[in-house]
Image (tube, rainbow, N blue to C red):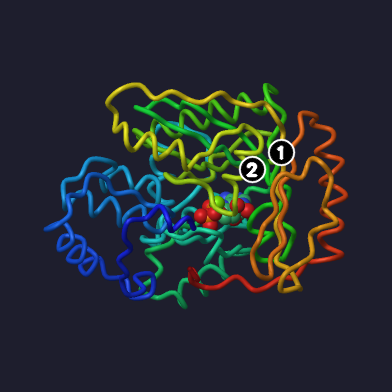
Amino acid sequence: MAREFLDDIYYMPDINKEWNMNDVTYAVSYLARSVKIDRIVALDDFDVEKAAKLREHLRVPGMGDTTARYFRDKLAMRMRAKEVGINAPEFVQILNYDEIKKFLKKVEPPYVLKPRMQAGAIGIKKILAPAELWEVLDKLGDDQSFYLLEQFIPGDIYHVDSIIYNNDVKFSISSKYENPPMEVAYEGRVFTSRTIARDTEEDESLKLMNKQVLNVMGLLRGVSHTEFIKAISDGKFYFLETSARVGGANLHELVKAASGINLWEEWAKIELLGGKGDYELPNIENNHAAILLSLAKQEWPDMSAFSDKEVVWKLNKKYHAGVIIKSENYNRITELINGYVKRFYEEFFASYPVPEKPTD
Ligand SMILES: Nc1ncnc2c1ncn2[C@@H]1O[C@H](COP(=O)(O)OP(=O)(O)O)[C@@H](O)[C@H]1O
Ligand SMILES: [Mg+2]
């Protein structure tokens, strides 16, 4: 983290564990007695609704509670998508048992039971048969209404990362995960994503659908990481989820390698503009890029052998290995990834169970 750019840091008790919005509200309001707060920015998914609540309380401009809900609550996203006819998996709210039973009769398994407000595939469970669902719901007890159930759609998972200014998508770039993030998280895989070939039909339909999603969810300004499934069964894209933040897993570095666009920097510019005046997108480079990430057996894995000229970034994190490659040539990226993935498995790969709750 670039702490040298921060004037001050205030610490709170671990609010992910001891979730207490009142304390946060008191603390920030106390701070606001002496500091004028112009903007509140959530740096990760878990902060999106906290930031919205604070804006509502302090009356600071930016996204409020209602819109934030569409970018955090997977049930709210599903319901909104359905209202406007965006293609998405069939789903049911975990609330009324008759409705759940109707859903189980209508929709074929497998299903996924997922927390409405998590991230990073935490708490997601594949359900193979109705009996299994009731068992899991029993265990969840009073927590079950914080979940939704949806149809599992086998397919590839894509993500579109974009910049939005005054409801207009100013920039978007689409990429595809080599393996679905759920498999990466639960079965242990090298995580890979690569930008998809530009101006192909796939690219255009993803960008179009991304625009629709962001418009109907009502993102006024900021950045978004939005995901889609391309179903094996019918070849169509299904809306998976959206968010009002920069994508995790170093995906901003992938975007930067491919396009030259730094999502964090652009987001900061947009916040400062605050809707007044025009936002000008920097020149975009047209490269292809791919990212590989893995847990590593070694504390500091030796990545020096990844020395092809296309390597533009390496991860520097204990027990992790990661590289980004970029090239104008799409085929060169394919060739490099195939070799690199194999070497990652041979040299570094390790897996670790997904935590039940977020760890940081
Ligand atoms: N309906 C679905 N059909 C198939 N796979 C799914 C479905 N929902 C989730 N997944 C899998 O679980 C992963 C995480 O789900 P997602 O809704 O994106 O939540 P998270 O916020 O944890 O990323 C997805 O990337 C995908 O691999
Ligand atoms: Mg996701």
Q: Earlier in the sequence, mark 1 or mark 2?
A: 2
Inspect this view and state whether residue 108 appears: no
Q: Are marks 1 and 2 in contact (CB under 8 Å)?
A: yes
Which percent across, then down, holds residue 141? 40, 76
In the figure, 292 relative to 257: above or below?
below
Q: Is residue 179 left or right of residue 104?
A: right
Q: Is residue 93 left or right of residue 162?
A: left
Residue type for callout 2:
Leu
Q: Is residue 210 left or right of residue 4?
A: right
The residue singled out by tag 2 in the image is: 254
Of residues 111 and 18, the one drawn nearer to the viewer in this rendering? 18
For label 1, the crowd category at 10 Å Cα-Cα, with few meaning under 14, some 14 to 19 and many 20 or more, is: many
The residue singled out by tag 1 in the image is: 289
Which percent across, then down, holds residue 173? 59, 32
What residue appears at the point 44 percent right and 39 percent down from the top-left corner? 223
Q: Quadrant of residue 117?
A: bottom left
Which percent across, then down, holds residue 54? 23, 54
Q: Is mark 1 within 8 Å of ligand 2?
A: no
Which percent across, then down, holds residue 333? 80, 38
What residue appears at the point 56 percent right and 60 percent down from the top-left corner? 121
Of residues 279 and 182, the one drawn nearer to the viewer in this rendering? 279
Residue at far front of view: 4
In the figure, 170 relative to 262: above or below?
above
Residue at far left of view: 33
Q: Secondary structure at mark 2?
A: helix
For label 2, the crowd category at 10 Å Cα-Cα, with few meaning under 14, some 14 to 19 and many 20 or more, is: many
Q: Secondary structure at mark 1?
A: strand
Inspect this view and state whether residue 63 appears: yes
In the figure, 93 relative to 128: above or below?
above
